[in-house]
Amino acid sequence: MVQVDDKGIRKIPAETGLKQYSKIRVYECALSLQYGIKTLRYYIGKKYDWFGILGFLLKILISKIVKIEILNPMHDGSKLFCSEMCMKVLQQSGVPGTDCYDANSTSPGDLHEFLEGSPYMRHVDLPVIVKK
């Protein structure tokens, strides 16, 4: 499992991730994600993209005020935030429908909307894990 948070981008055991979070949704893709996952290796050990998050919020604000869409003005190509990482994996794996998203500006809501609406993605129910 790959975790993206304030400590950066790192691999963690799946059991750790599943126990750590009270809300987690897991999706299964009908297509291979192998290529996107291979390119993700470049980001392991990199820092979290705090400025990218600020740029994402700035993008939303500008879009609402002047009614035009802009790209994330503060994105750092060597860093990622969580929903950006997921969308990059999907895009680099060639999952249809992802090409209309700007991964650098993909919100958790955008990602959820895509995952729920894509015929290639299926939500997987996980057993309930009780935190100790």
Image: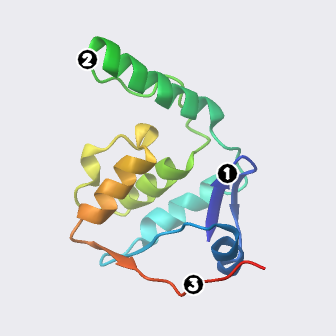
Residue at x 30% of width, y 78% of height:
30
Q: CA distance from mark 3 to mark 1?
A: 23 Å
The quarter holding residue 90 reads bottom left
Dot 2 amino acid type: Lys
Mark 3 / mark 1, whichever is N-terminal: 1
Q: Position of residue 130 (x, y in %)?
A: 67, 82
Mark 1 / mark 2, whichever is N-terminal: 1
Question: 110 or 38, which lies in front?
Answer: 110
Q: CA distance from mark 3 to mark 2?
A: 43 Å
Question: 86 or 123, which lies in front?
Answer: 123
Dot 3 amino acid type: Val
Q: Which numbered disc, 3 or 1, marks the residue closer to the eye?
A: 3
The quarter holding residue 125 reads bottom left
What residue is shown with label 3?
A: 128
Q: Secondary structure at mark 2?
A: loop
Question: 51 or 108, which lies in front?
Answer: 108
- Tell me, yes or no, whether the two marked residues, 3 and 2, touch with CB atoms within 8 Å: no
Q: CA distance from mark 1 to mark 2?
A: 31 Å
Residue at x 71% of width, y 44% of height:
47
Q: Which numbered disc, 3 or 2, marks the residue closer to the eye?
A: 3
Mark 3 / mark 2, whichever is N-terminal: 2
Up-down relation of residue 122 to residue 52 (above or below): below
Q: Secondary structure at mark 1?
A: strand
Question: 64 or 77, which lies in front?
Answer: 64
What residue is shown with label 2?
A: 67
Dot 1 amino acid type: Asp
Q: Residues within 10 Å of mark 2 (few under 14, many from 20)?
A: few
What residue is shown with label 1?
A: 5
Residue at x 37% of width, y 63% of height:
93
